[in-house]
Amino acid sequence: MTSLPTPGRRSLLLGGGAVLALGLAACGSTDETPSDPATSSGGRDIDRSLTYLELAGDSDGKVVDLLLDFRCPPCRSFMESFGEMFRTQVEQKALVLRIHPRPMLDLRRGTTFSQDSAAAAAAVYAQDPALLLDFEREMYAAQPETPEQPDPDLEQIAEIARSIGADETCLQQIRDRVYVPWTLDVVEPAAQELEVGTPTMIIDGEIWQGDWTQPGAVEDALGV
């Protein structure tokens, strides 16, 4: 049994298995050295000891972890189906939502899109956690329809962030790839220890083994 580093009111005791595995890839690589947020953005940062970006942390409801990759087509379908439901549950403080933005697919594809978009999500969260789900929605909407189509580049990712309200500090963090090391060195190794693909949903520390494509299955699992 493997656990993610999850300090806070409830720890995650996670077992093996996957909901929808695309196959695990090792962390992607980059030719650039990301900037230190303490010098590039006036000290704005996230808690890099955690493997997730948490919303509604004061809820007494279920803790739901979502392991996602912005280049994963099933992740796009999953969030298109359930993103608004999660938003409503967060706004009602009915659950704690923890987004784990993975760079899983980069090495296999020889790109940096997954890590750059995951790092951008962290930059958006550092500005204002309330913007995170908006960024998720728009990033998945921008996902190429086929493997042959080019991924959005770094400036296009920044423009997506701008469209949902990101400020200049956030945009500079995205361009500087400030949170790429966090995605590669913290988020992805923990996910690989679990031996799961994307999307994966974990409810109160247990990997959900259901079929999210079945009508009502996710809602029943969450008690919604």
Image (tube, rainbow, N blue to C red):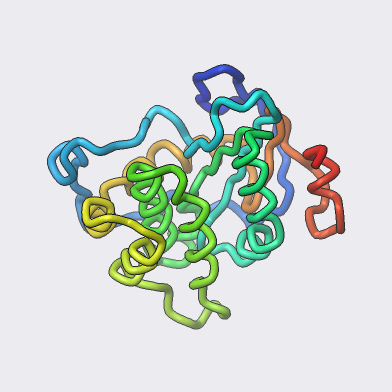
Q: Residue at x 38, y 39 (%)?
A: 185
What percent of the width, then of the height, locates residue 155? 28, 69
Residue 223 percent across, percent down from the top left: 82, 38
Instruction: Residue at 68% x, 59% y: name it.
Output: 78
Residue 213 visible (yes or no): yes
Q: Where does the image place residue 220, in percent across and percent down from the top left?
A: 85, 43
* Front position in the image: 79 or 195: 79
**Position of residue 49 in the picture relative to residue 96 (left or right):** left
Does residue 223 lie above or below 6 as drawn?
Answer: below
Residue lying furthest left in this view?
A: 39
Q: Quadrant of the C terminus?
A: top right
Work out whether residue 117 or residue 16 is closer to the camera in this orientation and state it: 117
- Marks counted in the figure total 0
Residue 24 locus on image (x, y percent): 57, 51
Residue at the front extreme of this rendering: 92
Q: Residue at x 59, y 38 (%)?
A: 97
Image quadrant in which you'd find residue 111: bottom left
Looking at the rendering, which quadrant does residue 10 occupy?
Answer: top right
* For residue 69, above or below residue 109: above
Give left or right: position of 159 versus 169: right
Left or right side of 206 for 134: left
At horizontal 54% and vertical 29% (from top left) the residue drawn is 57
Task: Please state, as top left, top right, bottom left or bottom right, where the N terminus lies in the image.
Answer: top right
